[in-house]
Image (cartoon, helix red, strand yellow):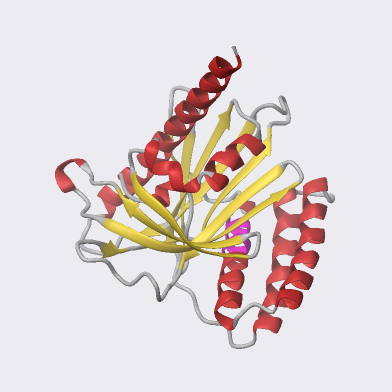
Amino acid sequence: MLPATFKLCAGISYRHARNMTGLRKTAMVAINHELSRLSGPGPSGWISQVRRRSSLLSSRIEEKAFSETDMSYIKQGEEALQKSISILSDQDGWQTEIVAANGDKVLSKVLPDIGKVFKLEVLLDQRPDNLYGELVDNMEQMGEWNPNVKQIKILQRIGQDTMVTHEMAAETPGNVVGPRDFVSVRCAKRRGSTCFLAGMSTHYAGMPEQKGFVRAENGPTCIVMRPSTEDPDKTKFTWLLSIDLKGWIPKTIINRVLSQTQVDFAQHLRQRMAAGYSMEAAQAC
């Protein structure tokens, strides 16, 4: 159910930057710090790559002279990544919501100023690059295989890592949750063998509130895809999700639906990837 947020991403309200250069530098320092915490003792290869690329991103931002609005979107995407990594790096306080028969697991915790967040942890029989290609490069096709998503449209691309999207949730049985849509800024990064897709809700002048839809908010949200330590052809897939659907919906219903939707998403993604590789094999014959 629910939205194109259940696609994977998105976030909280944003604030326009007052001093973009200072905010950008602060965000870079914070991201580096949180990446170190998430990786545990000692530097890792992908942490170092993210740090190097972050420095390159700062240089690229200076060179391209993005508009103030574009810069605000870039800053929001970095903020979503930083906040998500900070949440995921803290292993304390998580409570089990669902454990599926195949081992897929959803955990949750309540955070100050954010509320309840959910974390999906699954192992997928795909390499991170393949999953990244499906979830990022083929993002607008998600409605074809995820029943919870009606449509995703990329409204604007800013540089190589940032985009603004509009997501429409599919109708739910019994209309338990009425039609929702989301406008999100997304930060997509691929650093070595690890892939990230972070996001948060934003404002986009070209996509005002739509008739018949409630404009909901999501984030900070982030998907992290890393090769399994046991088998590099498999992926440790983690999805952090937080969402405010707005309206008068009991929290018990929202919590139950969100955790189940994450489990359903993992299964839909497995089926999509399996179908794609079956078609490739057939074409090769």
Spot occupied by residue 3 in the image (x, y as percentages of width and height): 35, 51
Q: Nearer the viewer, residue 41 or 69?
A: 69
Q: Residue at x 59, y 41 (%)?
A: 133
Q: Is residue 208 depicted above or below 229 in this figure?
A: below
> Looking at the figure, which quarter contains the N terminus?
top left
208 relative to 188 in the view: left or right: left
Q: Residue at x 67, y 39 (%)?
A: 226
Residue 111, visible in the rendered structure? no
Residue 263 quadrant: top left
Spot occupied by residue 80 in the image (x, y as percentages of width and height): 56, 63
The segment highlighted magenta reads 80-87
Residue 131 quadrant: top right
Spot occupied by residue 199 in the image (x, y as percentages of width and height): 52, 59
Q: Is residue 152 depicted above or below 212 in this figure?
A: above
Tell which residue pokes out farthest to the top in this image: 285
> Looking at the figure, which quarter contains the C terminus?
top right
Residue 26 highlighted magenta (yes or no): no
Q: Nearer the viewer, residue 20 or 144?
A: 144
Q: Residue at x 43, y 42 (%)?
A: 142
